[in-house]
Image: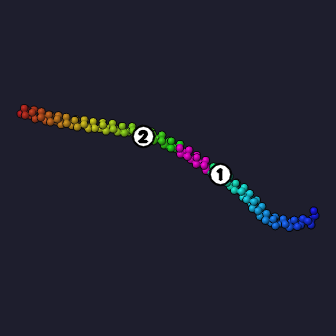
Amino acid sequence: MGWLELLPLLRRVLPLLDRLAPMLEALMAGRMGGRAAVEMNAANLADFAKAHTDVQATLDDQRLALADLGSQLSVLRGEAETYRSQAARLASQTAALARTVQLLVAVTLLLVVLCLALLIVLLLRHR
């Protein structure tokens, strides 16, 4: 086959190649774009994984802080109960002291009245 015989074949193939060239360019761009998209997705995935790790670390820190607050709350509840029982005991002691003071005042008044009565009796006898 000589060059002259190839020319009619090339003439039939050239329009096909002309249509095939843009498709090949689109395919190559798609592959390159696909690679870029894959790389971008990989970068996004890495960012997401880092953000997930950061969120997980923050949650772990908050869990520890919450557990610490829970233990502090338990201690505070115990202390509050202790203070409540002490307040009740002090209220009881205060009530008892008030009754004792009232009794002492009554006894003192009685003694004062008796002393006055004895004084009056002594003064009337010595006259």
What secondary structure is found at the residue carrying circle 1? helix
Majority secondary structure of the magenta segment?
helix
Q: Quadrant of the N terminus?
A: bottom right
* Amino acid type assigned to the residue bearing label 1 in the image: Leu
Horizontally, residue 67 falls left or right of residue 39, namely: left
Horizontally, residue 94 falls left or right of residue 119, namely: right
Q: Residues within 10 Å of mark 2 (few under 14, many from 20)?
A: few
The image position of residue 111, as x and y in percent, is 17, 34
The image position of residue 65, as x and y in percent, is 52, 44
Q: Quadrant of the C terminus?
A: top left
The image position of residue 115, as x and y in percent, is 14, 34
Q: Residue at x 63, y 49 (%)?
A: 49
Q: Which residues are magenta?
A: 50-63
What secondary structure is found at the residue carrying circle 2? helix
State the CA–CA distance, disc 1 to disc 2.
47 Å
Q: Quadrant of residue 24?
A: bottom right
Front-most of 14 and 101?
14
58 magenta-colored: yes
18 magenta-colored: no
Q: Which residue is mark 2?
A: 77
Q: Which residue is mark 1?
A: 45
* Amino acid type assigned to the residue bearing label 2 in the image: Arg
Front-most of 23 and 111?
23
**In this view, 9 is above or below 89:** below
Q: Residue at x 39, y 38 (%)?
A: 81
Q: Earlier in the sequence, mark 1 or mark 2?
A: 1
The image position of residue 108, as x and y in percent, is 19, 35
